[in-house]
Amino acid sequence: MSASSPHFDVAAYALGVLDDDDAEAFERHLDECAPCRAELLENQELPGMLDALKSDSVSQERSRP
């Protein structure tokens, strides 16, 4: 895993920034770690929220004179 503990990879996994090996290792960890599964469920909307913020920011910049 990319950090000293797999628990640090929850957000990175949710954002899709782990490499293939780390993602697979984290998925194996999820099978046995209820706290990480719960945190992942809480963070599953994060990528969409970030995309929405980015879209709003781009729209605002384009509408400025």
Image (cartoon, rainbow, N blue to C red):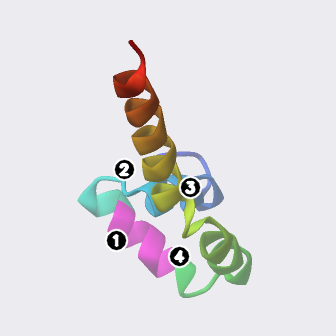
Q: Is residue 35 left or right of residue 17?
A: right
- Can you tell which mark lies on residue 62? none
Residue type beneath disc 1: Glu
Q: Which quadrant holds the N terminus?
A: bottom left
Q: Residue at x 54, y 45 (%)?
A: 3
Q: Amino acid at mark 2?
A: Val
The reply to whether residue 1 is in sight is no
Q: Residues within 10 Å of mark 2 (few under 14, many from 20)?
A: few
Q: What is the C-alpha distance between the residues marked 3 and 1?
A: 15 Å
Q: Considering depth in this image, is 43 or 4 the residue closer to the camera? A: 43
> Which residue, given by chain and number where applicable, does mark 4 sit on?
29
Question: Going from the N terminus, do you reach mark 4 or mark 1 first?
Answer: 1
Q: Position of residue 25 (x, y in %)?
A: 40, 69
- Is there a contact, CB below 8 Å, between mark 1 and mark 2? no
Q: Which residue is mark 3?
A: 11
Amino acid type of the residue that numbered disc 4 sits on in the rendered structure: His
Residue where numbered disc 2 is placed:
17
Marks 3 and 1, the one that precedes in the sequence: 3
**Most extreme residue toward the bottom, as rendered?**
31
Residue 54, given in percent of the width and then of the height, sits at 44, 39
Position of residue 61 measured from the top left corner of the image (x, y, whole percent): 41, 23
Upstream in the sequence, badge 4 or badge 2?
2
Q: Amino acid at mark 3?
A: Ala
Q: Are the two marked residues, 3 and 2, in contact with CB atoms closer than 8 angstroms?
A: no
Q: Is residue 39 above or below residue 51?
A: below
Q: Which residue range is magenta in the image?
A: 23-29
Q: Nearer the viewer, mark 3 or mark 1?
A: 3
Residue 38 in sight here: yes
Q: Alpha-carbon neighbours of circle 4 within 10 Å: few (<14), some, or many (≥20)? A: some
Q: Which residue position holds label 1?
A: 24
